[in-house]
Amino acid sequence: MPALQPVRGTQDLLPDEQRRHRAVTDTARRIAERYGYHEIATPIFEFTEVFARPIGETSDIVTKEMYTFADRGGEEVTLRPEYTAGIVRAVISNGLTQSLPLRFFASGPMFRYERPQKGRFRQFHQIDVELIGLAQPQADVEVIALGADILDALGVLPRTVLELNTLGDIASRHAYRDALLAYYRERRALLSEDSLTRLERNPLRILDSKDEGDRRVNAEAPSFAEYLTPVAQGFFDAVRAGLDLLGISYRESPRLVRGLDYYCHTAFEFVTTDLGAQGTVLGGGRYDGLMGVMGGPETPGVGWAAGVERLALLIGEPPRAARPVAVIPVGDQGEAPALKLAHALRRDGFTVDLGYSGNLARRMKRANKIGARIAVILGEDEMARDAATLRDLDTGEQIEVPLAALRDRLAPFR
Ligand code: ATP
Ligand code: MG
């Protein structure tokens, strides 16, 4: 049998890497709480229709990337490729539309069948925020400000640019769609295969294409700005004014369209140049049409998702694990007291390492290797005096302490 390997596009998060991921999600959760966002978790798999319709039948996700299978009972289910549809499904299933607005934070694994490369996996993780039930542009400003604060707390904000666009309201989208159709129809010969299939169903999607030829065509494509209705223009102006007020800088990016069908008005991405082609670390927008598409009452919403792997690549050194106290018995008589002491210290809130074998020298070596801050050495002579030796592993300083005073002496190292 060949050595067992993880499935392509999946990876183990060994403790140092997992600590980086935790730093990202813990920071995001803490800041989201300041904004009044409460954590929610929805199932990792849902009925396929929960994702297929809302995400859009012409989208990359639905046409190529979903992990869909029939379960043993014959139900068509899909591993979630993104959070928004599941959260909106949860709002509808639980009747939460009675208590709007709702502010949610979520994090967890996502699954997309993609070509794996740096910053792109088949199982990856997202943090996600959703603000459901507010139609005002201030809501868009709020979620963008929250995203910027999280990136700032992670030290990543200065290495990103916020790109901003509007997808307008339905009337502007129709007008723009017609203009795009006319433009692309004249240039059919230059478009990729994928874009030709998108052309009649959803020409806006072509703007999002990563194909080189498509991109050249897109460079000259009509811009949405010329087709905005006064209402859509007013909404966009208010979002920009809000961002200006908060000192959040942005770059208008007329070709930015989100890959998903239910977006309207604001679309945004925080992009970095530090990750090659996988430069988008956080992306989102307004999705006023989604709840209705999913069979719930028409309810506006705005939110974003960010890739934890990409953010983890951008943050500096992972925070260190807590430095343990090493409890080291000398000789057989020390074993039982060491076990008891380690147990008591752990219950007291200390991080404790207790090796179970080796002489004093070997155990000291281990204590240094795992980065212990201090060693409690239980030698025969000291124990006869109801005492232990404390050794500061950074300075090498050593003192004898009565067992009764141990806790107090260790308190600074908890
Ligand atoms: P891309 O254009 O890079 O494919 P996307 O538009 O598909 O991104 P979204 O659906 O908006 O991405 O997801 C939000 C964020 O999740 C992305 O900005 C990115 O940081 C992260 N992300 C998306 N797909 C992957 C993946 N396969 N592996 C790792 N992170 C991902
Ligand atoms: Mg993608």
Image (tube, grey):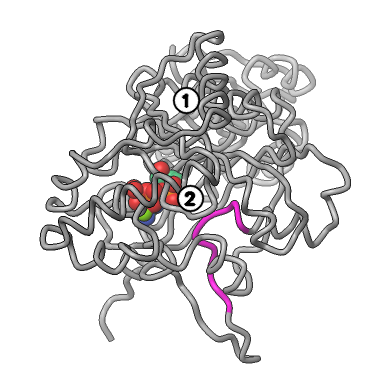
Total numbered labels placed on residues in the image = 2
Magenta span includes 96: no
Label 2 neighbourhood size at 10 Å, few (<14), some (14-19), many (20+)? many
Residue at mark 2 to residue at mark 1: CA–CA distance: 16 Å
State which quarter of the image contains the N terminus: bottom left
Q: Is residue 119 above or below residue 191?
A: above
Determine if residue 224 is in view: yes
> Residue 395 in the image: x percent, y percent?
44, 12
> Residue 181 in the image: x percent, y percent?
31, 55
> Residue 318 in the image: x percent, y percent?
42, 31
Name which residue lies at 62% across and 26% down: 137
State which quarter of the image contains the C terminus: top right
The type of residue carrying mark 1 is Leu
Q: Residue furthest right?
A: 98
Mark 2 vs mark 1: which is more N-terminal? 2
Is disc 2's CB within 8 Å of ligand 1? yes
Q: Which residue is mark 2?
A: 125
Name which residue lies at 39% across and 70% down: 63
The span shown in magenta is 77-85
Name which residue lies at 83% across and 58% down: 94
Q: Which residue is mark 1?
A: 151
Magenta span includes 80: yes
Q: Nearer the viewer, residue 356 or 59?
A: 59
